[in-house]
Amino acid sequence: MIAVHPSPAAPHLSTLIATAVENVTPVFETTMDKLLKEVQELFEQQLRVDSLLALSKKLQRELKERLQSSPQCMLPSHNYTLPNGQEFGTYLALEVGGSTLRVALVDLDGRNSSRQPLRIRRIVTSTIDSKVRDLRGVAFFDWIAEKVGEMLLADREARDYTQLKEPLPMGIAWSFPIDQTSIRSGNIIGMGKGFHCSIYKGHDLGDLITQACQRANLNIRLDAIVNDSSAAVLSRAYIDPLTRLAVILGTGINAAIHLPISSLHDSKFGRRECPSTPATHVLVNTELSMFGKRAFPTTRWDEYLNAHHILPDYQPMEYLLAGGYMGEIVRLIIAEATETAGLFNSRLPLTLSTPFSLDTHTLAAIEADTYPSLSPSCSNFQDKYLLPVPPTHVEMSFIRQVILSVSRRSQGYFAAAIHALSSLLHESDHATLANGLDHISIGCDGSVINKYPGYMEKSQELLDQLARLDRDRRKRVVLESAGESAVLGAGVAVAMANASDQRMKPDNLQ
C-alpha cells in the first residue's frame, strides 16, 4: 500500500477552495428569523387594547366630521325605519354584484313565527363574466330580466304569482354607486371597470329594471333599492330587534348604521322629498372603507401597495384589513423574504410574482393548519403555486407566522372600527338605546368575518376588552352572523315599502 502524503501546497489549496465556495454562497441582508421578528413587531405593536382604543377615538372624530361635510361618506339612505318583524309575504329579491347576479324568492313569516322567520325559498346564481359585462346599453338589464324570468318559471308557486293581476313586488340590492332619489329610484353613477352599459350613467335604475321586465313580459314591480350594508341591517333587524348596525367584511368592507336624523348635517339630504310619515332616524351608508387614513399605522408593505394601487388613498381601511388585500400584503412580504432572506432559495415562483395572486382562501387554509409538520400546507402550496419542490417546514412556518400577523392586525383594526361606530351610536342615540336594550347586535356578512378561521370570535374578544377598558359605560356590542343578507335584506326592504304603501292608502288614514 502506498501512502500519499499531502504536499506543502495542499493547505493553501484548501484555503483557496474554501474561499471560492464562500464567494458563491449568497450573502443575505437578513435572515427569515430576523425578518419575521420585524414583521411581528410592525403588524402587532398597535394591537394592545389601549392602543386599539386610541385608534377608535381617532376614528370616532373622523366619523363625526364626515357626518357633517363629506359628500362621499356617511350617506343617508331612504330607509328611515327598521323592520318591526311584522312584515309578511313572499317577495322577489335581486342581488347585483360585480361578479354575480342572484335572483331569489324570499318568504317573511314574522319575527315570532314558529318556522324560520326570514328565509330564501328559491335562489338562482348567475355569473357576471366578461361576456355579460360587455353587453351594451339596455342589453345588460335585459339579461337580468331574462334570469329573473328563468327563476320564476322554475318555481311552480312563482309561476302562479306572475299570473296575478297585481305585479309581484321586487327589491334589489345594488352593489354599485347610485344617487338614490327615493326608495324605488336612483340615478346610476357608474358600474366600474369592465361594464359597457355606461351610456346609462345618470339614468334611473328603477326605470331601467322595470322596462326590461316589461320587455320580458314579466308582471313585476320594483319597489325597493338598497345597498349591501343597508340590506344587512334590515335582514338582521327583522329577526333581532336589538340590531342597529351591520358590517360587510369580505373582499372589501362597508357598514351601515341607524342614526338620528339630527346627527347629520342638512346638506346630506340634498333636495329629497320628506318621507311620507314623520321620521326621526335614518339608515346611513358609512362607506367605511374610506376611513382611517389619519388613524391607522402602516408598514412599508402597506405603503407599497397603496402607492401602486389604481386608486391610492381612496379606501385606506379596506387596503389594510379586507380580504381583497390581506393576501397581497403577505405576498409582498414573501417577495421581500425571497430577495433578502433566502426564502425559496432566493427564487420567487413566477406564479407569485403577479400582484394579488395570493388569495385569502389560501391564507385561511394555512392559518387553520394545526399539523406540527405543516405538511398539508406545504403540499397544497406547492400544487397551487407550481413550486418545483415543496416548501421546507422552516419556509412554511415563516409564511404561516406572517399570515398570523397580518390577520391579527386585520382583526384588531376591525375591532377598533366597530368600537368607533358603536360609540358614535351611543353618543348620538343615547335616549333610544337606554330604553330597554341590554346589548346592541351587529349583523355581519362577508367571507372574512363569517368564514376566516376564528375571525369573528377573536374580534368579539377584542371588542369586549375595549368595552372593559373604555371609561364610558356603554351597551355590550355583539357580533351576529347575517348570512345571505343582500337578498334577504332586499326582500325585507320591499316588504317594508309595501307595508308603508298600505298605511298611506286613504282607507287607512282615517
Image (cartoon, grey):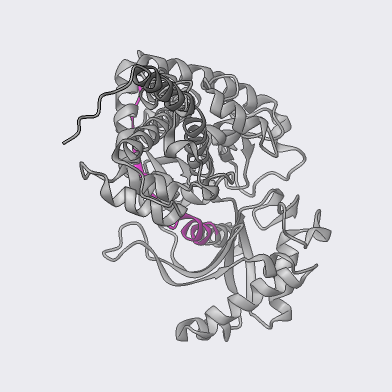
Residue 145 falls within the magenta-colored stretch: no
- Does residue 345 sit above or below 55 in this rendering? below
Instruction: Left or right? Give the position of 461 relative to 256.
Output: left
User: For the point 60% across and 38% down, which residue is it?
Assistant: 287
Q: Nearer the viewer, residue 9 or 510?
A: 9
Magenta stretch, residue numbers = 474-493
User: For the point 65% across and 75% down, which residue is it?
Assistant: 145
Residue 79 percent location from the top left of the image: 58, 47
Regarding residue 234, the answer to whether it shows in the image is yes
Instruction: Left or right? Give the position of 201 relative to 73.
Output: right
User: For the point 59% across and 19% down, which residue is it?
Assistant: 294
Q: Image quadrant of residue 130?
A: bottom right
Residue 438 percent location from the top left of the image: 29, 33
Residue 63 percent location from the top left of the image: 57, 25
Quadrant containing the N terminus is top left
Residue 415 percent location from the top left of the image: 40, 30
Q: How many marks?
A: 0
- Does residue 200 sit above or below 168 in this rendering? above
Residue 486 falls within the magenta-colored stretch: yes
Quadrant containing the C terminus is bottom right
